[in-house]
Image: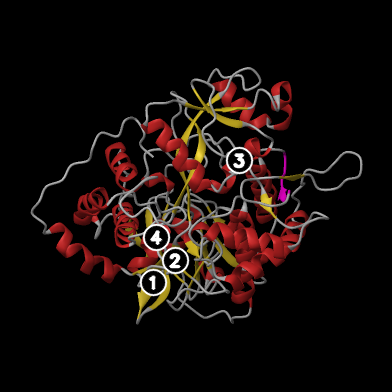
Amino acid sequence: MTGAAALSSLSAVGLSDLSPASLVGQPVIVGGGLAGVMTALMLEQPCVLLSSGPLAAMRPALASSMLAQGGVAAAVGGDDTPALHAADTLAAGVGLCDPAIVARVTADGPDAIARLAAFGVHFDRAADDGALVLGLEAAHCRHRIVHARGDASGAAIMEALVARVRATPRITVVEHAPVHALLTQDGAVTGVRVNVAGRDIAWPTSAVVLATGGTGGLFGDTTNPLGACGQGLALAARAGAVLGNMEFVQFHPTALAARHVTGPMPLISEAVRGEGAVLVDENGDRFTEELAARDIVSRAVWRHMRAGHHVFLDARQVLGARFATRFPAIDALCRAQGIDPARQPIPVRPAAHYHMGGIMVDGHGRTGVPGLWACGEVACTGLHGANRLASNSLLEAVSFGTWVAHDLSALPLTRTAAPSEQGIAAPMAPSPSDARRRAMARGAGVVRTHDELHETVRLFAPRLEHDDAALVSAMVALAALQREESRGGHFRADFPHAAAGATSSRLTLDMVRAAIIPIVSRDAQMTFPPDNGVIA
């Protein structure tokens, strides 16, 4: 296809002032969340940022970064150190963190806050002395959560960074441009196939960065955008990348259990429990330690609900009328559902929230596939291990986005062909049906068993070659089936104890294909037990 044809398709998204030749050789960043925009901003050379929708979209949100309430974990307090932050991170990861990566990321915390501030993020500060206001969240030994705009930290950070991206001429932003394949040759990534204004564009490049987010949209209850179905994981797997620790999914214990919510479940931030709010049932009885690690609290809530109870987060005694001032965004979410947190306990339930697994990368964000980098939730960096420490994810996105950018900036631009039109784009695959999301939640949810995982793999296996969401669902369930122990975010009711040694898991597409053969050929038919209304 000629350069003119390529230009005509790009013109449909406002790039008529650019020639295809101007984009030749530029790194392509896929994903418009915090990791993607940070990579683009920190790069020292021209780059292309592809977003599946509008950057900084909020209603509906397309990036989980926009929905983050808790803030950024960083050891900036006078009584805190990166070593203490690292110790908390290692304890939460239950043996599967990479200590060197943990030390590097936590040491970068104060500088990460400074970099964000330099890009225009206004963090919350005390009125009297201007010091950063620091929150406490579960499994942290110090107040170290840095907020922006109270409990709307993600939106505040993203709005500032996206404004800076739009004001940076060397960054070409293409919105409404979902990537549906990676181009490869001789085992290396050579570009992307992207849908731009209904046209299928082959976009050659020698450097692709995946920053596509997580997997919450695969589950029946989730705090993630419903489109977060692990697309980047599937792209990487089909290109030959190794994926790690796919079984480890964090379920947040306190999503708002509202009856009239469509899309992501509103999150009742851990910071509310950090202020002293307690988890109670319909009788007002407490049943767990609120500031234990998230996996422990989620299982306690799940079990209490399975026993027939309703669960609430009660902030009336500790916050009362101050709730709306301390947590204005959460207060608005609750009031939209007819709940006044100052006077009423908030109904909550667990929901899929964060995926600790992902594409295996090194300390520069490089995958094992030449030409492919990954950062943010789609990557498995070694920071989170078996369970993410609260508010470490935004820090990881800032740190690894920076390090990926530094790695790419040191590479020379490679001459490639110009983007070219390949014809009308095929329709994008629909999001998983409610039935499949419920099946995934039952089979690979908060508490798992061999039979339910086996049946989940068998359900998705026939679709994995042509359905990215089915592939990622099968990989999560298969990794969970193969891990016959309980550790961090992965809990097996039939193997409730941790093994003596902690071992990370690895999967490739070929490994998945080989593993499912005996599963799909099994004659016995299995069905799921009733879910008792608890689908995450």
Magenta range: 143-149
Location of mark 2 (residue): 359
Residue extending furthest toward the right: 128
Instruction: Give the mark nearest the N terminus, 3 or 1.
Output: 1
| Residue under the image location 66 percent in, 70 percent down | 104
Q: Position of residue 195 (x, y in %)?
A: 40, 55
Separation (CA) of disc 2 from disc 3: 27 Å
Separation (CA) of disc 1 from disc 2: 7 Å
Separation (CA) of disc 3 from disc 1: 34 Å
Assess disc 1: are there few (<14), some (14-19) or many (≥20) residues with their C-alpha within 10 Å of its C-alpha. Answer: many
Instruction: Give the mark nearest the N terminus, 3 or 4.
Output: 4
Location of mark 4 (residue): 246
Towards the viewer: 533 or 38: 533
Location of mark 3 (residue): 270
Q: Are discs 1 and 2 less than 8 Å apart at CB? A: yes
Relative to 536, 356 lies left or right? right
Q: Position of residue 215 (x, y in %)?
A: 42, 51
Location of mark 1 (residue): 241
Q: Amino acid at mark 2?
A: Ile
Q: Are discs 4 and 2 less than 8 Å apart at CB? A: no
